[in-house]
């Protein structure tokens, strides 16, 4: 909702720039999509490594 209100303000102040932003937004989203996928992959890998290192502590903690 905030993005929409900011876009409406931009539309009132400078409508050509607002229309340009409206047209370019999908292309920018597509350009940034690989970086999001890499971020999710790195996040999953770090969570896996963390779980791997904490596994012995979990096993020892569950036994007592």
Image (spheres, rainbow, N blue to C red):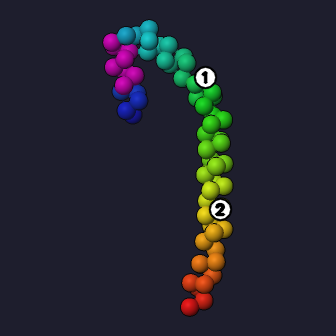
Q: Tell me: residue 14, above or below residue 57.
A: above
Q: How many marks?
A: 2
Q: Quadrant of residue 63?
A: bottom right
Q: Nearer the viewer, residue 55 or 31?
A: 55
Q: Is residue 27 magenta?
A: no
**Direction bottom: furthest residue:** 64
Going from N to C along the chain, the mark reached first, 1 or 2, is: 1
> Whole-percent x and y of residue 17?
44, 12
Q: Are marks 1 and 2 in contact (CB under 8 Å)?
A: no
> Whole-percent x and y of residue 28?
58, 25
> What residue is pinned by disc 2?
49
**Direction top: furthest residue:** 16
Q: Tell me: residue 9, above or below residue 49.
A: above
Task: Label 2: state its secondary structure.
Answer: helix
Q: Quadrant of residue 50?
A: bottom right
Report whether 34 appears left or right of 1.
right
Task: Please provide the residue range marked out in magenta.
Answer: 6-13
Q: Residues within 10 Å of mark 2 (few under 14, many from 20)?
A: few
Residue at the image position 36 percent from the left and 25 percent from the top = 6
> What residue is pinned by disc 1?
27
Q: Residues within 10 Å of mark 1 (few under 14, many from 20)?
A: few
Residue at the image position 37 percent from the left and 21 percent from the top = 8
Task: Label 1: state its secondary structure.
Answer: helix
């Amino acid at each position: 909702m905030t993005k929409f209100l900011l876009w409406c303000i931009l539309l009132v102040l400078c409508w050509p720039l607002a229309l340009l932003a409206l047209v370019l937004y999908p292309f920018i989203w597509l350009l940034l999509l690989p970086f999001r996928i890499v971020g999710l992959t790195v996040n999953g890998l770090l969570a896996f490594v963390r779980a791997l290192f904490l596994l012995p502590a979990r096993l020892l903690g569950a036994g007592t």
